Image (spheres, helix red, strand yellow):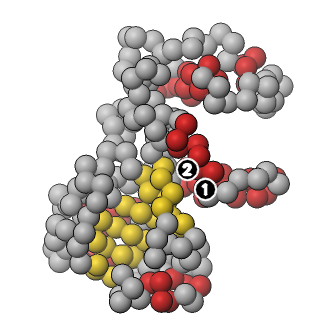
Amino acid sequence: MAVGGSTNSVLHLLAIAHAIGVELTLDDFETIRAKVPVLCDLKPSGRYVATDLHKAGGIPQVMKMLLAHGLLHGDALTITGQTVAELLVDIPAEPSTEQDVIRPWSNPMYAQGHLAILRGNLATEGSVAKITGVKLPKITGPARVFDSEEDCLSAILANKIQAGDVLVIRYEGPKGGPGMREMLAPTSAIIGAGLGDSVGLITDGRFSGGTYGMVVGHVAPEAAVGVRSHWSKRAI
C-alpha cells in the first residue's frame, strides 16, 4: 500500500497466508487501505521507477516510516536473525529532503491506500481496483463484452472502442484463462489509443503492475465456474 504496488499483491499475499496458516481475508485489505497512505511517487500513475526509489532510501526507508507510525510489528523476526526494529535502527524516521520519490508522512501522494476492494452484482465475492491516478472515479456507459483477452484487444486495435465504453473481459480467471493471465495487452492498447481516462475495464483476470486507469480485476466468482447469470450481457 505504501509504495503503490500491483493489484497482484492481493493474490500473492492471500496465497502465502493460506499456505502458512495465517488468517488474512480480502476485506483485510480495505482495513489496511484506510490506515496506510501512499508514500511513493512511482509509475505507472507517478513519475519515478524502482531504481529511483532505491536511490532515495528504498524499502528500508518506507518500512521505517511505517514502523515509526505504528503500522509494522517491530518485534517481527526477519531472515537476518534481527527483528524489524533492529534492522531499521539506523534508518531515519523521515526521508531525505533532497529527493521527492518518497514523500514525508505529512505530505503523502494519497492519504489512503490505492488498492480498493469492490463488491457488486458482478462481483458478489469481491474484486480489486487500483485507484491511484484515476481521473474519473465513475464511468457509466455501454458494456462491450468479450470472452477472451484476444477478442478485446482486436476490438481496441480496430478502433471499435469509444470513449465512455466499459469493456468486460470474462473467462480469464484462474479456471477460465486458464491460469488467470495478466490483461497487459488490452490495458496497454487502451492507453495507446488515448482512452485511458475515458474507458473502463472489468475482468475476472488480473493485471500487471504497469496497468493504469479505470480498471477492476480479480472479479469473483469468475465466469468459468458456471455462475453465468453474473456475467450475462443482460446482468451487465
Label 1 environment density (alpha carbons within 10 Å; few <14, some 14–19, many ≥20)? few
Task: Using the rendered image of the protein, determine whether residue 158 is visible from the camera's viewpoint.
Answer: no
Label 2 environment density (alpha carbons within 10 Å; few <14, some 14–19, many ≥20)? some
Residue labelled with disc 2: 30
State the quadrant of the C terminus: bottom left
Relative to 167, is 93 on the left or the right?
Answer: right
Judging depth in this view, the residue of 148 and 116 nearest the camera is 116
Amino acid type at mark 1 = Asp
Amino acid type at mark 2 = Glu
Q: In the rendering, at what x and y percent does residue 65 appear?
A: 57, 22
Residue 14: assigned label: none
Relative to 174, is 143 on the left or the right?
Answer: left
Q: Give the residue at x 44% y 57%.
A: 129
Callout 2: SS: helix
Q: Give the residue at x 30% y 65%.
A: 200
Residue labelled with disc 1: 27
Task: Using the rendered image of the protein, determine whether residue 143 is visible from the camera's viewpoint.
Answer: yes
Tell me whether circle 1 and circle 2 mark residues in contact (CB < 8 Å): yes
Relative to 110, is 68 on the left or the right?
Answer: right
Q: In the rendering, at what x and y percent does residue 185 appear?
A: 35, 65
Q: Give the residue at x 46% y 38%.
A: 112
Q: CA distance from mark 1 to mark 2?
A: 5 Å
**In this view, 189 is above or below 55:** below
Q: In the rendering, at what x and y percent does residue 210 appear?
A: 40, 50
Q: Quadrant of residue 194?
A: bottom left
Q: Quadrant of residue 26?
A: bottom right
Q: Give the residue at x 57% y 11%.
A: 92
